[in-house]
Amino acid sequence: MSHLSEIIDNHSNLDGLFAIIKHYGVSAEFVTDALVQRFEQIQKDDNSEAKTEEETAYCEEILDSLNQYYARL
């Protein structure tokens, strides 16, 4: 599967996931908090293994964005 196909499929899957979340009225606060907790856990778990600088920067960047978003809610 090409990288472009993976991106398109992932966007479609996320649209479906968010449709379910919206249908059941799951709050943005809950989803954001769950994502922050999971990315923090990934950082902790991956600290014991060799991680690339790019992966570390990505995790830090997404956590920063999620924390800023959560603060706005």
Image (cartoon, helix red, strand yellow):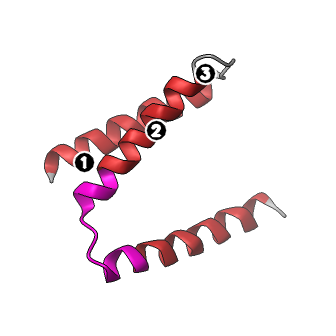
Q: Mark 3 points at which residue?
A: 53
Q: Quadrant of the C terminus?
A: bottom left
Write down the residue under mark 1. Answer: 69
Q: What residue type is labelled 3?
A: Glu
Magenta run includes residue 23? yes
Label whose residue precedes the other's in the sequence (1 or 2): 2
Q: Give the range drawn in magenta.
A: 20-32
The dominant secondary structure in magenta is helix
Q: In which quarter of the image is residue 21?
A: bottom left
- From the viewer's perspective, is the residue at label 3 or at label 2 nearer? 2
Do tag 3 and tag 1 residues touch (Cβ < 8 Å)?
Answer: no
Marks 3 and 2: CB-CB under 8 Å?
A: no
Which of the 4 image quarters holds residue 56? top right
Q: Residue 8: percent from the left, percent from the top? A: 65, 70
Position of residue 39 measured from the top left corner of the image (x, y, whole percent):
46, 38
As measured in the structure, the alpha-carbon distance from the residue carrying label 1 to the one carrying label 2 is 15 Å
